[in-house]
Image: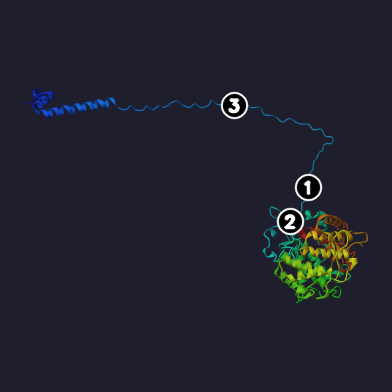
Amino acid sequence: MDAYEKDILADEALLDAQENRPGAAQALLDNLGAAPWWIVSGSFHALLLLLLTLIGMAIFRPTAQEIVIDTSLVQDPPPKEEEPRKPALKPQPVTFESEQDPVENLVFVHEQMEVAEQAETMDNMNTQMAKGEEDKISDVDFAGQGVSAALGLNGGGGGKYGTRFGGDKNRALRNGGGGPATEDAVKNALRWLAKHQEPDGHWDTSKYASRYKTDTACTGFALLAFLGAGHTEKVGEFKDHVRRATKWLISRQQDSGLVFDSTDAGGHRGTGYPHAIAGMALAEAAGMGRSEVTKAAAQKAIDYSVNVHQQGDGSEKLGWRYQPKSPADLSVSGWFVMQLKSAKAAGLHVDPGSFEGAIRFLDSVEHKAADAYGGSTYWYQTTNEHAASAHRLTAIGTLCRQFLGWKKEDLEGSVNLFVNKGGVPKWDANGSSVDLYYWYYGTLCAFQQGGPAWKDWNEAMKKAFCENQRQGGDEDGSWDPVGAYSDNWGRVGQTALGCLCLEVYYRYLPMYK
């Protein structure tokens, strides 16, 4: 029997066995019949209980919540209709009727601009002055009425000389009332002085119509004129002239500190005038050039002025005169006050007692005027009026008060008094009305005071100088030595003083705002 047949026989045997086995229901009944009654009863009840449970679950099954999903889409708003574009407008020619003839060649003429000798910052501030000079801050208390340390720098702060340079100079010139004519006059005067300076640095006054040899004072005047226009030992067109003049003055300084050339007319006005003027020039040169040698000489000159020459000692100090310790007069004292003020502006040390002495002396020569101006006049000395020089002395005394810290309103009457009684600058045909000593102090004082008095004074001063400056020849740029005191300084002094008057706009800032 092969394998295939064996499989067939096995399948048939399996089928026979399944057919002879009893059914499931029959088997259950047979088993129940043989089981005890209590088992049958328990099984029945359990089956019944299961059936009832299934029926209950089918009846009470919870209903699922319905979830509504909105499948509608949000529609975009309909697009806006674009407005129709307007056609571009073409410019239409406009015809203007004019009664004037047409200009064939239109030419614009601009005023020639001055090229600065020194670089300036974006806001026209001179770069040399932009940083400032930290050592020029004063140590003087500026509160109230008394000594203020800066020459025309709003009554306080350190003198920076900033308005003598670059853009600040140009602004100060315009604001003060100057212009191209005054600047041309200054430049021409400086060129004359430069041309006639001696090789060693001084100016020989005997060569130029001076009755007396006053080289020390006139060299100081000339040096101040160069410094006032912004020329120093280090910068400017005339720096070499400044350097040589400064060196010459230092070479004439004695061990005591006195600056005086021994060949000058010492018997004429003594040593007071020349030392004060030369010392002021050295102080300004030190402040502007910042040379240690010049600074040392200027400090030595100041020490002589306050320790040797000033009248009195300690709390008894007063003013100055021709010779050391002599009874003071206002004319000489004015120059010493200016010297001490220049020294403070330059950062030099000045004994505060010397200023207090100057104030005591001014108090002793001041007299309230019985007139409509309500100001004060100043005498030459405490017991010596010099009535013929009242206008000149009042200008000197009032300027000293300004630079020593007096209030503007307290000096208004005095300024109006000398301007109206002494008159404004006037250069008549023969020069007899010229008085540069008065004009110098009057110009500085009226400028500081400002107002109508300065306006009148300034217009007259510009006319007097600009219309009478020499043109052509060897005297080109100078002023003739005519009028009061001109024989004391000749053409050199006359030209230097005239130059200083026209530099007033930027030499010192206004101290009153």
* Front in this rendered view, residue 219 or 16: 16
Q: Which quarter of the image is occupied by the N terminus?
A: top left
Name the side, left or right, on which 503 lies relative to 292: right
**Mark 2 lies on residue:** 168
Q: Is label 2 in a helix, a strand or a loop?
A: helix
* Chosen colour scheme: rainbow
Res. 92 image quadrant = top right
Q: Give the mark nearer the N terminus: 3 vs 1.
A: 3
In x, y percent, where is residue 490? 87, 67
Name the secondary structure under disc 3.
Answer: loop
Q: Amino acid at mark 2?
A: Asp
Mark found first going from the N terminus, 2 or 1: 1
| Res 110 label | 1
Q: Residue at x 9, y 29 (%)?
A: 36
- Circle 3 residue: 82
Quadrant of the rendering where the C terminus is positioned: bottom right
Q: Residues within 10 Å of mark 2 (few under 14, many from 20)?
A: some
**In the image, what residue type sits under mark 3?**
Glu
Q: Residue furthest bottom?
A: 255
Q: Which mark is residue 422?
A: none
**In the visual, does 348 lie left or right of 383?**
left
